[in-house]
Amino acid sequence: MYVVLVYDISQEEKGQKRWSRVFKICKKYLSHIQNSVFEGEISKAQLVKLQQELRQFIDKNLDSVIIFKSRNEKWLDKEFWGKVEDKTGFFL
Amino acid sequence: MYVVLVYDISQEEKGQKRWSRVFKICKKYLSHIQNSVFEGEISKAQLVKLQQELRQFIDKNLDSVIIFKSRNEKWLDKEFWGKVEDKTGFFL
């Protein structure tokens, strides 16, 4: 399936560290397309693994992770209205 | 159609002001579901208006706005892995 994952990690409770952890985990499974946005094709099994890994670090009271799932990428059109790539770079 | 809009506004060049503008414009057309993420049903005409309004404020070299469009919301499943609502509140 094709997924878009967006996250917002609170700065409270050592948020920067959690942000980096979440970023690194997502990067193992998906492509980075914007500051806190990932996308990509992923199997059900891999998605479960991703969720399990993230669960260890996400603070359920502070952080938000939303995942949009589509059975097929072609059902979802993507448009860039600003800059196309994230050129800021994240070398974590 | 159903859309998910994610944006990342650079802090450079009075970014905070641009962020607020972009936030306010998106809020007129869509529902706020995460820090810089909106979603909702929108017509083609309204989407064009939204794009026109945003274009005035977005810095094409600094800011990123990505819009995912699906003809039908049912083609897209949404899951919350962290907190469900954005409780931080944005009273702009």
Image (cartoon, coloured by chain):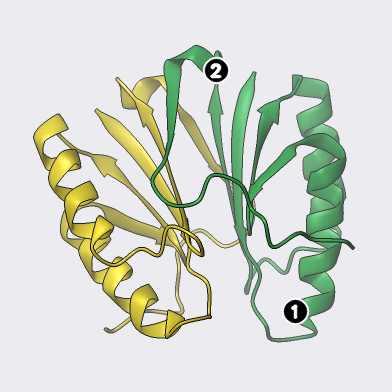
Chain colours: A green, B yellow
Q: Is residue B3 left or right of residue A13?
A: left
Q: Which element is circle 2 on?
A: helix
Residue A23's spot in the image, x, y percent?
A: 79, 57
The residue singled out by tag 1 in the image is A15
Residue kind at label 2, given as amino acid type: Glu
Label 2, label 1: how far apart the Cα atoms are = 32 Å
Q: Quick one: quadrant of the C terminus of chain A?
A: bottom right
- Do marks 2 and 1 both belong to one polypeptide chain? yes
Q: Chain of mark 2?
A: A
Disc assigned to residue A73: 2
Residue A30's spot in the image, x, y percent?
A: 76, 36
Q: Chain of mark 1?
A: A
For discs 2 and 1, the disc positioned in front in the rendered view: 2
Residue B77's spot in the image, x, y percent?
A: 49, 29
Foreground residue, A30 or B84?
A30
Identify whether B75 is placed above or below B55: above
Residue kind at label 1, given as amino acid type: Gly
* Residue pictured at 31% horizontal, 68% vertical: B23
Q: Which element is circle 1 on?
A: helix
Residue B79's spot in the image, x, y percent?
A: 55, 41
Foreground residue, A52 or A19?
A19
* Residue pictured at 87% horizontal, 61% vertical: A91
Q: Is residue B9 left or right of residue B69?
A: right
Foreground residue, B90 or A59?
B90
Identify whether A90 is placed above or below B6: below
